[in-house]
């Protein structure tokens, strides 16, 4: 079974448990903390992924880091992942949990890259329009890329809207090449 499928199944089970316990936001916060730590600490990821490191050692490391800092059920989940030999999938599981959480809460992730910084008014207007179009709450991530010359590129899931000057110039150039 692929890593994605396994991570997705564990994330779904954890989200279902969070719903049942009415602690969805708490679980999300804990999973984000775990993800942040795993991203920042490559040594921890290496220890968890290494089959030579004894299970007891992996458990001790995870308990030292997370016991008392996250929900006890999350600590039990981490111990289960180690026992099942799935500790190397923890980062993938946290990512999948975040995706499923966003779907559950109807949160739309929108990434906007613009040539210049967007004003608060433009961000607010853009967020409102996206929320209305997709019927959900919007989390707007912004970035600046001066090579766009002007305009913006909006990415929502697998949909991309390129309203940048450089994009228009590239399309115009391609149309001349085809002629």
Image (tube, rainbow, N blue to C red):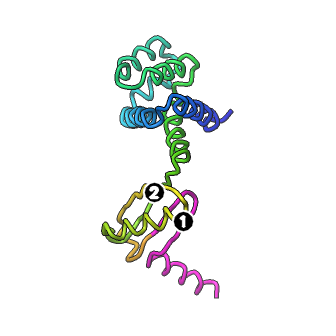
Q: Nearer the viewer, residue 55 or 179?
A: 55
Provide residue 147's location: percent of width, then percent of height: 38, 71
Q: Secondary structure at mark 1?
A: helix
Residues rendered magenta in the picture: 153-179
Decide: is 34 above or below 134. Answer: above
> Which residue of the protein is positioned furthest toward the top in this rendering?
56
The residue positioned 41% from the left and 32% from the top of the image is 30
Q: How many numbered marks does the figure carry?
A: 2
Q: Earlier in the sequence, mark 2 or mark 1?
A: 1
Location of the N terminus by quadrant is top right
| Left or right of 60 in this view: 167 | right
Circles 2, 1 touching at the beta carbon (< 8 Å): no
Q: Which residue is mark 1?
A: 133
Provide residue 91's location: percent of width, then percent of height: 48, 34
The residue positioned 45% from the left and 75% from the top of the image is 164
Q: Is residue 117 visible?
A: no
Q: Is residue 74 visible?
A: yes
Image quadrant assignment for residue 60: top left
Q: Which residue is mark 2?
A: 138
Provide residue 128's location: percent of width, then percent of height: 44, 65
Q: Which mark is residue 152?
A: none
């Amino acid at each position: 079974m692929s890593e994605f499928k396994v991570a997705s199944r564990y994330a779904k089970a954890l989200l279902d448990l969070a719903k049942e316990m009415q602690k969805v936001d708490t679980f999300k916060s804990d999973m984000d903390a775990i993800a942040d730590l795993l991203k920042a600490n490559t040594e921890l990821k290496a220890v968890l992924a290494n089959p030579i490191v004894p299970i007891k050692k992996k458990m001790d490391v995870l308990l030292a880091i997370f016991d008392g800092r996250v929900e006890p059920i999350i600590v039990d989940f981490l111990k289960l992942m180690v026992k099942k030999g799935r500790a190397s999938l923890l980062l993938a599981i946290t990512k999948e949990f975040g995706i499923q959480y966003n779907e559950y809460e109807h949160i739309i992730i929108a990434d906007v890259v613009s040539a210049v910084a967007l004003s608060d008014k433009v961000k607010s207007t853009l967020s409102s329009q996206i929320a209305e179009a997709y019927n959900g709450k919007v989390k707007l991530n912004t970035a600046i890329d001066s090579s766009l010359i002007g305009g913006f590129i909006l990415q929502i899931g697998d949909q991309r809207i390129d309203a940048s000057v450089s994009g228009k110039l590239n399309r115009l150039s391609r149309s001349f090449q085809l002629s």
